[in-house]
Image: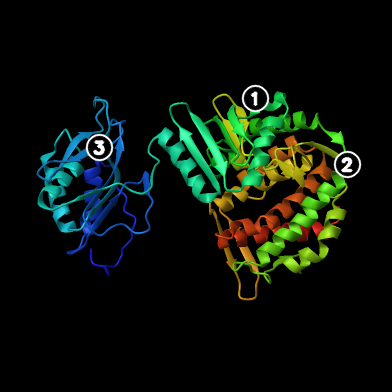
Amino acid sequence: MPKDMPVRSRDLRMQSSSSIGETVAHALQELQQGDGIIVHMGDTLLGFAQPPKQDTVFVENRNDLYRWTSISRQPAGDLKILGDRDQHAPAGERQVCVGVFVFADGALFSSLLRQALALQSKGMDPFFIALEQYAAETTMNLVAPHQWYDFGHLDTYQQSRMRQQNLRHFNELHYDPERNVITKRSRHVDAFRHQVRWYRQIPDELACYLPRVYESNDGAQPYISMEFLSIPTLSELMVGVRLETGAWNDVARKLAHILTKLEQYGFNSPLAAAMASQVYVEKTRQRLGEYLAQETAVPQAWVDVAGVRVTLDFVLGHLQDYANKHALTSLTRLTPIHGDLCFSNVLYDRRVRHVKLIDPRGEFAVPGIYGDPRYDKAKLLHSYRGGYDDIVADRFEVELAVDGQIRFMPDHDRQSRERIGSIFSEQLFSGPQELREAHAIEALLFLSMLPLHVDKPRRQLAMLYIGLQRFGQLFMDSP
């Protein structure tokens, strides 16, 4: 493919298709002389920035040959398709096509594909017939990709999702498919050690709401091994609209039950107010300082709240008064808390209507399982009301005007979200005062998470908008 070849992009839709070959041939109707072709199946993702320009078939060694098309290089150099998703393939590993193909001579492959389609063979897909014939006329490389994420099967989807999480966080996840055990480690050693200890310290009565832990170590190199649960998170169910609105009643009821159980282990503590002040005031100041020191920071950005320009300076100048006004530092009782109870850390099995919690924080000002019970509810609030999960899924529009004003528009069904929000608020909160205090904490959550998303400036801007707007409204409104 010429280095300066222009890239043309356009969606093409077919009414129906009987094969991969027919679909690809439809897309090649506008092929121009000298064009190269990259065929990329929609259920696969490879870990490279730019595809190669030479003829290439990306392959991987697999033994579940009924899922993929297996291929090998013959002694003469030709490529041979050994089986096209063969349900009766013998045991043992073979190289399989992972779903990305590069043809430097697009015109040649297109011609061979049309010929294969004309044969109307009942056996192998015409695409792979044309691939064999193309490889007989030119040399094709068989290349193992550095990373292969397959989303075409339920189990490989779950594995691929875990591997992508490794890219987004500072965690290392290792999955043992034979035992269905996942082992987690982290480069954030101290914070992760707190998480490991949380699993050991949480009351046994709550164990049914957690994955089964097989082994853990909280020493110099902490790790935890637990059962792998291939059920979706509430984040996936919410963003993907995969759960009917009424079913969220059961989800909210389950979570409210868990939080009630945790509160039964609470106690009054003279340290509670100081711990709350550390989290809601000092930690917020520290996190905003970290954000303002980043190149991605927009310190003069503002949001209009009832005619007032709310900025980060406004927040920092009124933070203590804000905390006092909403009784955030008047905490007297500590209970066991999860500490990071956002929708991405809650799994929900729709088949048996059961909740599982993962990835606890293990710290609220000080290491341990105890903290402010309002914090967990605010974490849930920032998912079902604040739209946190839509933001990390990049389901929003945001812009920064020349004068510094932020404009933000979420990409979801507002009415549906409001109904779900009403369901949760009714189940979780005892009254308007508790809900208002959780709203106040929610605003600080969005502000304090800003430096954690330094690699995603758009997301930072969206979170800044929500944090400033929530803070301004709650600071200026009368209780």
Residue type, mark 1 in image: Cys
414 and 397: which is toward the camera: 397
Question: Which residue is at a point 47% across and 26% down the rendered structure image?
Answer: 179
Residue type, mark 2 in image: Thr
Q: Quadrant of residue 425?
A: top right
Q: Is residue 98 left or right of residue 328?
A: left
Question: Which residue is at a point 76% across and 31% down the rendered structure image?
Answer: 262
Q: Is residue 298 above or below residue 423?
A: below
Q: State the mark number for residue 332.
A: 2
Mark 1 highlights which residue?
Answer: 208
Q: Is residue 324 left or right of residue 233?
A: right
Question: Which residue is at a point 82% across and 43% down the rendered structure image?
Answer: 434
Q: CA distance from mark 3 to mark 1?
A: 42 Å
Mark 3 highlights which residue?
Answer: 69
Q: State the mark number for residue 280.
A: none
**Residue 26 place in picture, x, y as percent:** 23, 51
Q: CA distance from mark 1 to mark 2?
A: 29 Å
**Residue 312 place in picture, x, y as percent:** 73, 66
Q: Is residue 327 left or right of residue 404?
A: right
Mark yes or no: residue 257 visible. Answer: yes
Which quarter of the rendering shows the N terminus? bottom left
Mark yes or no: residue 469 visible. Answer: no
Residue type, mark 3 in image: Thr
Q: CA distance from mark 3 to mark 2?
A: 63 Å
Disc 3 is placed on an element classified as: strand
Q: Are marks 1 and 2 in contact (CB under 8 Å)?
A: no
For the rendered model, the colour scheme is rainbow
